[in-house]
Image (tube, grey):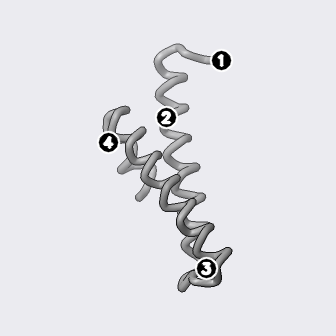
Amino acid sequence: MSAKEFREKDEKALLEQLLALRREQFNLRVQAATGQQTRPDQASRKRREIARLKTVLRERELAAGGAA
């Protein structure tokens, strides 16, 4: 999913998506550790997708004046 698609969603949906992506990432790690992974590129794709989503969440936080 692209950053543009993430920006179209509300914050609750983004947090749910983040949780789902982290679960998928964990499952891919387990598969890699047990030698069952069929597509090794999926782990890096999930990592990048999580980074995109977290970037959008941070942009919204800064826009709302919540700079830490």
Q: Distance between the residues labelled 2 and 3?
A: 27 Å
Q: Do the residues labelled 4 and 2 touch (CB within 8 Å)?
A: no
Q: Which of marks 4 and 2 is nearer the N terminus?
A: 4
Q: Is mark 3 on a helix, strand or loop?
A: loop
> Which amino acid, mark 1?
Ala
Where is residue 18 drawn, in percent x and y? 46, 46
Q: Which of marks 1 and 3 is nearer the N terminus?
A: 3
Q: Are marks 2 and 3 in contact (CB under 8 Å)?
A: no
User: Can you say whether 41 is above or below 52 in the image?
Assistant: below
Query: Which one is nearer the viewer's eye here, 63 or 36?
Result: 36
> Which amino acid, mark 4?
Glu
Q: Residue shown at 33%/40% (left/top)? A: 13
Which quarter of the picture shows residue 11? top left
Q: Mark 4 points at which residue?
A: 8
Q: Residue shown at 32%/34% (left/top)? A: 10
Q: Name the residue under label 2.
A: 57
